[in-house]
Amino acid sequence: MPTNLFASCMRTLVPLGVALLVSWFGRLGIPVDSETAAAAVALGIAGGYYLIFRGLEWLAERLAWHPLRRAAGAFLGWARPPAYAKDLVVPLRLLVDQAHLDRETRAAWETYQQAIKGGGG
């Protein structure tokens, strides 16, 4: 698995794992009666966890505070955000054979006309 893909997976799964652990270990004093409510609480915990540590990581990048950036990234499952390669842009030139296109269009039109005449009579 490429490193960037592995890093992005880790940074997605670690907050979910933390939310699962937090919901198992005490549920933060919130009584949860149904599975739907438990899922909503876990989703909220995971989202909050991710936003807090991603926000810290972003702030540390802006302040050039590398120890905080690494620590916040580690709490997300990978010490730094994945770096994705930019899309490759290739200029493409098409040469259209106008005469061939005209012949094919004319042949298709004639076939269509014959089908209509043959099917309507």
Image (cartoon, helix red, strand yellow):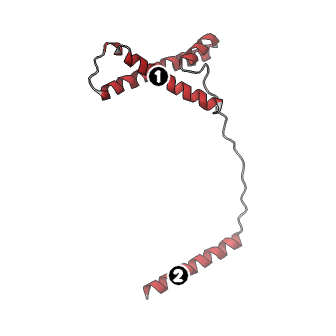
Q: Find the distance from the CA under tag 1 to the CA under tag 2.
A: 65 Å
Instruction: Assess disc 2: are there few (<14), some (14-19) or many (≥20) residues with their C-alpha within 10 Å of its C-alpha.
Output: few
Identify the element where label 2 is drawn: helix
Specify which label sits upstream in the sequence, 1 or 2: 1
Residue with the most extreme left position: 33
The answer to which image quadrant residue 100 occupies is bottom right
The answer to which image quadrant residue 60 occupies is top right
At 43% from the left edge and 89% from the top edge, which residue is drawn? Answer: 121
| Image height of 8 relative to 98, above or below | above
Identify the element where label 1 is drawn: helix
Dot 1 corresponds to which residue?
17
| Image height of 94 relative to 49, above or below | below
Image side of residue 46 versus residue 77, left or right? left
The answer to which image quadrant residue 111 occupies is bottom right
Give the amino acid at mark 1.
Gly
**Percent coordinates x, y for residue 18 in the rendering:** 46, 19
**Percent coordinates x, y for residue 80 in the rendering:** 62, 21
Instruction: Assess disc 1: are there few (<14), some (14-19) or many (≥20) residues with their C-alpha within 10 Å of its C-alpha.
Output: few
Can you tell which of label 1 and label 2 is closer to the viewer? 1
At 51% from the left edge and 17% from the top edge, which residue is drawn? Answer: 53
Give the amino acid at mark 2.
Gln
Image quadrant in which the N terminus is located:
top right
Which one is nearer the viewer's eye here, 97 or 70? 70
Image side of residue 27 versus residue 104, left or right? left
Dot 2 corresponds to which residue?
113
Residue with the most extreme bottom position: 121
At 46% from the left edge and 22% from the top edge, which residue is drawn? Answer: 17
**Percent coordinates x, y for residue 116 in the rendering:** 48, 82
Which one is nearer the viewer's eye here, 38 or 86? 38
